[in-house]
Amino acid sequence: MSKNKKTIGVVYSTNPDFEYQNKEVNNAETLHPNQQNLKIWLEKNHRGGKTVSVIKGFIGQESDLENLGRKIKSSCGTGGTVKDGEILIQGDFRDKILALLIKEGYKAKKAGG
């Protein structure tokens, strides 16, 4: 089975002639930066009291999201990760991230409290 397919429905069958149904994974094309609508959140919950800046709303391929995350991490000079379609940056860098995203041509704004 390739990485672009996911089996749906049955996990195990005793029927020797059974064929799994595969569902194609949607590899969405990455939208142009001025069409992206990114939101920058500040979260502390479930992180041991540590503050994390979270960038949500990216539409596109995982590789493009990882490249954007790499740019943001190097600009802020801190660690972070790309997980579940979100970019997580250690610390409160919302202003710096917002300035970088706007400079890169993205539509971005702060969200949350």
Image (cartoon, rainbow, N blue to C red):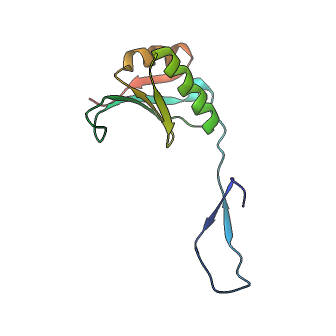
110 lies left or right of 82: left
Query: What x and y, as percent, mark residue 67?
Result: 60, 27
- Depth order, front residue of 97/38: 97
User: What percent of the width, then of the height, locates residue 38?
Assistant: 47, 29
In-image side of 37 versus 23 (left or right): left
Q: Is residue 39 above or below residue 24?
A: above
Horizontally, residue 100 falls left or right of residue 47, namely right
Quadrant of image for the N terminus: bottom right
Residue at x 57% of width, y 28% of height: 35
Residue 48 image offset from top left, x and y in percent:
27, 37
Q: From the viewer's perspective, is residue 15 above or below residue 3? A: below
Q: Quadrant of the C terminus?
A: top left
Q: Quadrant of residue 50?
A: top left
Instruction: Please name the residue shown 68% across and 53% down the image.
Output: 3
Residue 16 x/y as whole percent: 72, 85
In the rendered view, would you say 66 is above or below 13? above
Residue depicted at x 51% and y 40%: 85
